[in-house]
Image (spheres, rainbow, N blue to C red):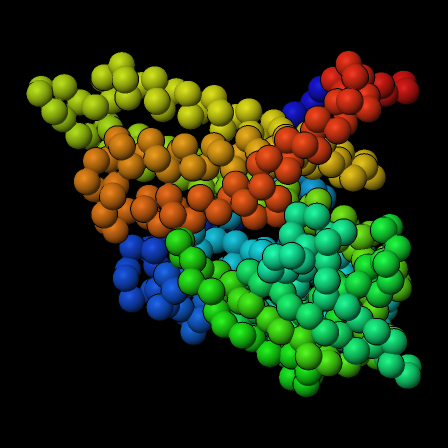
Amino acid sequence: MDFRIPAEIERIRAGIADFVETELLPLEADPASFDDHQNIRLDLLEEVRAKARAAGLWSLQMPREEGGGGLSRVGMAVAYEAMNRSIFGPVAFNSAAPDDGNMMVLAALGTEAQKRRWLDPIRDGEVRSAFAMTEPHPGGGSDPGMMLTRAERRGDGWAITGRKWYITGAGEAAHFIVVARTSDDPRSGLTAFLFHRDDPGWHIVRRIGIMGPEEHGGHCELEFDGLTVPDEAVLGGVGRGLKVTQTRLGPARLTHCMRWLGLAKRCVEIATEYAERREGFGVRLAERESVQTMLGDLAMQIEIGRLLVMKAAWALDGGSYARTEISMAKIHVANLLHTAADRAIQINGARGYSTDTPLEWIYRYARQARLVDGADEVHKMVINRELRASGPALWSWPVRED
């Protein structure tokens, strides 16, 4: 097995690393860089994004024919990990959720007209976007089969009614994808639709407060009371909503893991730097066996996470949905991020609990990792389902035909 990366990907990784070091980390250290929701100020973000474009580090995940950098999933794993050394990183390079996943699904399933109308402005950073699927009880969450939002045929279009919540970025989004029920068929009853912020027939009920720092646009509850969209707003075909969600959510879950690995490494970086210079009772923390054990274990767990992510990325590049591989990576890396932040805070003591470092920011952010895009328990069910179907073959190696 060859774990070497191409020289071009290494060049991109090095460019991202330099940009993060020189442009983003200094901004993190300045409280004036943050907005009221503990993210980078939007006016400052536009300045940083202009620099990322000028450096050739913009929308790297998009195919070249769609105006992007043409990175494979494996290349994205390398690049995204480097981006999220900074808490401002992904959004600066136009690689943050939910825009990231929305761009990829539009590139994969959109018609040419839909790409030009809906994808290009997101890719160019002119607008933000949101993906509206999750519903309040008794509607659909991890189980899309429970979805209650409906779209009914009205003339040559569709009228959408229902409710969605915890929709990331909705407060700042202009372009939306909403999944609604168009029939009661268990496999082909859902359809994805595109709509614009200014279209009548829907509104934001509230921006929901959360435990951690927020993405731009927050996490919102939406109500649809007759939003009407034309047939050309159907994404992927009528009754193909499950395919749209599978196409979008699988890679999106994995890109979360890519980014979270960068944050986990940042936690270790901060903890290691402090342990090397902080003394207590005549001994540096770095010399204490308990600290060495904590940091050594984190280094191992991060490398396990990187291997899981790379295997899943490799499978996606090969045309697989990689459901089991992505679920394994999602569980491991989500829990790893929380552990890395927790241990780094413990090593830093009161300094880690304060806002003098980004550790408390990462700690609060990390708790959502075990929930977003499927809770741990759901992904363990996915793995078990594959285990029951495949038995020992779950652990078989793909065979290369030489």
Given the current orientation, which residue lies at the most extreme left position?
281
Is 233 situated left or right of 375 in this image? right
Number of marks: 0
275 to the left or right of 249: left
Q: Quadrant of residue 199?
A: bottom right
- Pinpoint residue 401: horizontal percent, then vertical percent: 90, 20
Q: Residue 334: x, y in percent?
A: 52, 37
Residue drawn where x is 84% and y is 74% of the image: 152
In the foreground, 380 or 89: 380
Instruction: Locate residue 332: give its quadrant.
Output: top right
Report x, y in % for residue 110.
Answer: 82, 63
In this rendering, is residue 384 above or below 327? Answer: above
- Residue 50 vertical position relative to residue 5 in the rendered view, above or below: below
Figure quadrant of the C terminus: top right
304 with respect to 271 (left or right): right
Residue 166 seen from this side: yes
Q: Pick whichever, 353 or 142, lies toward us.
A: 142
Residue in the image at 23% along x and 27% along y: 276
**Quarter of the image where the N terminus is located:** top right
Q: Is residue 196 visible?
A: no
Q: Nearer the viewer, residue 244 or 93?
A: 244
Q: Is residue 179 left or right of residue 296?
A: right
Q: Where on the picture, by quarter, is residue 125? A: bottom right
Kindly identify the residue that appears in the image at 60 percent across and 35 percent down. Answer: 377
**At x 75% / y 71%, what residue is drawn?**
194
